Amino acid sequence: MSDKHNAGDVPTTGHVWDDDLGDYINQPPKWWMLGLTASAIWCVVYWIYYPAFPISNTGYFTPGIGGWTAIKEMEADKSVVDEVRGKYEAKLKDMTPAAILADSELTEYVTRSGKVLFGDNCAACHGQNGVGTHDKQGLFAPILNDDDWLFGGKIDDIHTTIVGGRQGMMMAHKDMLSEAEIDTLANAVASGKPTSTPLFAEKGCTACHGEDGKGMQAMGSANLTDSVWRFDSSVEGIKYTIKNGVNAGTPETRVAVMPAFQGAKLSDAEIKKLAVYVYKFGGGQADAPAAQ
Amino acid sequence: MSQEVDKSAPAKKEVGEVTTIYNEFETWTWTVNMGDKTIHAKRMPGFFRTFKDRAQLALWLPFFFLPYLRWNDKQAILFDIDHRQFHFFSLTVLPQDIWMLSLLLLVAAMTLFAVTSVASRVWCGYFCFQTAWTDWFTWLEEKFEGNPTARRKLEVAPWDLDKIKKKSLKHLSWALLALFTGISFSIWFVDAFDYWNKLIHFQLPTVGWVTLSAFFAGTYILAGLLREQTCIWLCPYARIQAVMNDSQTILPTYDYTRGEPRGKIRRGGEVVAPQGDCIDCFQCVQVCPTGVDIRNGQQLGCITCGLCIDACDSIMDKIDKPRGLIRYASLDELSGKPAKKMYQHPRTLVYIGIILLALGGIVWGLTHLGSMTLKVIHERQPLYVSMSDGSIQNKYDFKLLNKTSKDFKVKVTAEGGIKDQVIIGAEHQPLIHHGRGTSFTIFVKAPGIYANKDATPIQFRVESVEDPMVFAEYTSQFYAPKK
């Protein structure tokens, strides 16, 4: 950069490479020296102002006189978010899930902000957005965005489910029914008309699944007449369920357990938000006409 | 770029009516200013002087006063950056439509190019803020410090009370104009009256003070101190515009065939040697705000303001020669070639074509602004849900932007899609807030027997309950299990 010296005026360092390569002793240009000095000063200022040097292995470091830390900056940013959320959260605290649902602005807030909560706590079994998850036995956890509910799809039912958890129950029938009876029943159920065989009433299926085979919400027994299936909809799968039951205590039995979320796992407000969030997946059932 | 003028100019003692003009050289010599001297241009009346004065005012008076215009109890023209809205009388443009701004800038740039290719730096000479403010600043200077000769004398004069008074009054007036410029700029972006109220109570937000200071300092330095140096060394447009001239472009030109050989006129009009019409009076240089000598031909410093034409014409009148020794002429004309017609100037035609295209885009944009925009995002996970009655349900996220000035409720309908489909989720007619986005969820449920294609187009229409003309449409898909 410096054009003050031409090659002829300046001595070289005296070292010669490759026969003819030398190195002139030129001063660096002034602007370059200024930049260098300014950078050095900047470094010193930076070291003093910001946290810089670790000291020994005790974890101590020079804190810097500016008082800046990454945590502080993060918390300042977070407080901005909390401020926006704060007014909604304050409202939510004393409202019932049904009341939240009746407020379109709060519902909007919950459906936007509930995603993280659902992802952290529910999606492991129910899948992202409640699409359900499958294992080798069929559907592992129910789909939450259809309108078929074992324990009720009203907002308060969903809330109760999250608060206390749920546990399905069905006896294993492999020792009570003959292979032929199981086959008949399974085919009837698979066709969507369980009551078409007299065995359904005779063998006591109606006790849990109801006279009409539509299930009983209080027990969480499945509706056998609709087209949504809890486990496996094939005849073989239905036979397996009849034989081994649900949560029947054997190694072969089907498993359907949802843990309780109240207390250690989630706060009351979080459960309320999740109830509304799940309700709004698309299968929520209105309490009474025009409750929305 | 520097050329010294013959300092030993004779005829200093001449007192003839015309020859007195030579006396003005007494205190100065001129060079093309490299920034080490202040140019004190003489103001002479004339056609171009008047035109320049009026053009400057016509363009820039609205800059100062238009923001005070009210429309429907609101500022008529307001670039509301705070709320991300642009108000133009009844029209409100939201950032979503800001693509039109790029077309507007394109029109501006192309107009600049087109005009330049026809008549050179018209913008620079008569309209540019640098030219205008510099002109006003030097006008103020002349009011307080006197004509160029007096100013040159004052510059070298010792600091006495008179000089202090003149100088401080000038700088005060400059500062006031600069301040008013800063204020006038600011009020295009915030409510004008509210701004004044905050300003006089010293309650502007930081960004307000920064903007005001920047424009105050910018005006003061650029128009007061740098002046023509801005055009010569700083301005990128000046460089671009200068290369757009060609031999067909008309620009202030010295007719060298008529003027040369130049020579000073003697008292009584005696002619010593064969002489052209230029009497070497330097009036053209003296009036030039950028200090160039137009007789050297078109050059970078020339902003084509035509003031030298005024000066020269006035001299030609006095010495009974025809006007137009310096005039707007093209290089072709000067070298005796026939003048070409407009349509023979393809460059200009291309510019005009681009301008028309961009204008068309803006007109289309403004007439298709709409009062509402709609985006429908289909839920991807799950694409569809099988319901207990065998029907298929799809979920859609509706995102609406209400561009009107009030909130309204909307209803949602759909065309296409599946037979006997039901739209769920908008029964309560969602309220759409104006000026910001509103979103809600819509479900479409259709019988499984009809929903047998994996994707069926469905066109949603959202319209205001009160006014069906306020609507927006969006085409999405309805997904179902393939059968």
Image (spheres, rainbow, N blue to C red):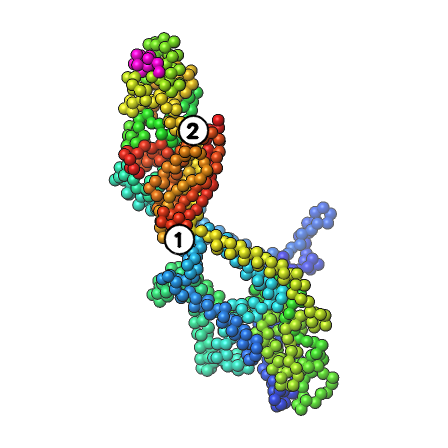
Q: Quadrant of the C terminus of chain A?
A: top left
Numbered disc 1: secondary structure: loop
**Residue closest to the eye, B458 or A150:** B458
Q: Is residue B435 above or below residue B175?
A: above
Q: Which residue is mark 2?
A: B448
Q: Quadrant for residue B124, please give it.
A: bottom right
Residue A61 lies left or right of residue B122; in this view the side is left
Secondary structure at badge 2 equals loop
- The span shown in magenta is A196-205
* Figure check: A253 above or below A5: above
- Residue linked to disc 1: B404
Q: Nearer the viewer, residue B67 or B303?
A: B67
* Viewer-side label of 2, 1: 2
Q: What residue appears at the point 29 percent right and 37 percent down from the top-left corner?
A: A291
Which sits earlier in the primary sequence, circle 2 or circle 1?
Answer: 1
- Residue B217 left/right relative to B13: left
Residue type, numbered disc 2: Gly
Instruction: Name the amino acid type tagged 1.
Output: Thr
